[in-house]
Image: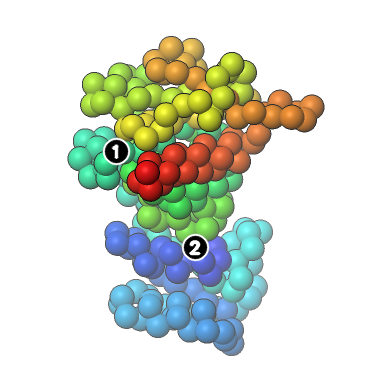
């Protein structure tokens, strides 16, 4: 059982098709249109609702900013690889996170993935950030809408995706090829490596090509969650441009 803190993460969890909220807690005496929307939605779905003191919420949230609201949710659902691929919207957009360790980065990437309409996000079963309350909070509730799959071997996954017709693009700050030179109008799987060490060697070797984001400053790379947002923007730009042609 996980605890989500904040109004927006709780609302998004309640609105998810696969709603896994089991209890919602609101600070006593708190009133606002969004709080009322949250209360009404909780009652409509028949989910347990309680009103608690601020001190109780502070204790349960363990220092997280809760805005007078928290909820208990069952473990986030994960999907099978085949289910994600079968339900993908052509041409297909997948994200593979090869060893992202910071829950805040994971949450921010999930938010960008949902906004960009990614069909699924794949994480390794080991050596990966947990989808905990911090990650869900950083996703601003988007984690409830993203299809996630845990895989035992990322390199093997990439081989499978190639067989399904996906082009594998690895993000590499040191690549001589820029993001703008890549073609993302085809079925695309985007690979992002660990915050400090990047992609594992076998994963890198499985990529069809590597691409980097041009930089001008002394710092030579973006934070991985920022980089993911930039890459996803370029994917959307190319695909919308192709539709307009």
Q: Is mark 2 on a helix, strand or loop?
A: helix
Disc 1: CA contacts within 10 A as few (<14), some (14-19) or many (>=20): few
Q: Name the residue under label 1.
A: 91
**Image spot of residue 88 (x, y percent):** 26, 43
Q: In this rendering, would 237 be left or right of 83?
A: right
Residue 9 in sight here: yes
Decide which of tag 1 and tag 2 comes sooner along the chain: 2
Name above or below for residue 7 compared with residue 167. Answer: below
Q: Name the residue under label 2.
A: 9
> Which of the image's four quarters has the N terminus?
bottom left
What residue lies at 40% left-to-right and 17% top-to-bottom?
Answer: 208
Name above or below for residue 119 compared with residue 43. Answer: above
What residue lies at 44% left-to-right and 39% top-to-bottom?
Answer: 238
**What distance separates the C-alpha of mark 1 from that of mark 2?**
30 Å
**Image spot of residue 30 (x, y percent):** 59, 84
Disc 2: CA contacts within 10 A as few (<14), some (14-19) or many (>=20): many
What residue lies at 69% left-to-right and 29% top-to-bottom?
Answer: 215
């Amino acid at each position: 059982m996980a605890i989500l803190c904040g109004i927006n993460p709780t609302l998004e969890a309640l609105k998810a098709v696969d709603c896994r909220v089991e209890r919602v807690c609101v600070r006593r005496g708190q009133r606002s249109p969004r709080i009322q929307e949250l209360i009404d939605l909780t009652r409509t779905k028949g989910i347990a609702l309680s009103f608690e003191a601020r001190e109780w919420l502070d204790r349960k949230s363990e220092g997280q900013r809760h805005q007078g609201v928290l909820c208990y949710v069952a473990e986030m659902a994960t999907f099978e690889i085949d289910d994600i691929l079968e339900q993908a919207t052509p041409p297909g957009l997948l994200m593979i996170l090869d060893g992202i360790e910071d829950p805040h980065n994971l949450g921010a990437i999930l938010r960008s993935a949902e906004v960009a309409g990614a069909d699924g996000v794949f994480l390794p079963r080991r050596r990966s950030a947990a989808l905990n309350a911090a990650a869900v909070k950083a996703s601003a509730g988007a984690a409830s809408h993203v299809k996630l799959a845990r895989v035992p071997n990322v390199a093997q996954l990439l081989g499978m995706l190639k067989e399904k017709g996906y082009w594998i693009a690895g993000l590499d700050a040191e690549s001589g090829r820029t993001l703008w030179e890549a073609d993302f109008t085809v079925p695309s799987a985007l690979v992002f490596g660990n915050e400090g060490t990047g992609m594992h060697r076998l994963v890198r070797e499985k990529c069809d090509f590597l691409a980097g984001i041009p930089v001008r400053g002394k710092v030579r790379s973006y934070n991985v969650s920022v980089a993911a947002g930039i890459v996803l923007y370029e994917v959307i730009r190319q695909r919308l441009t192709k539709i307009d042609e």
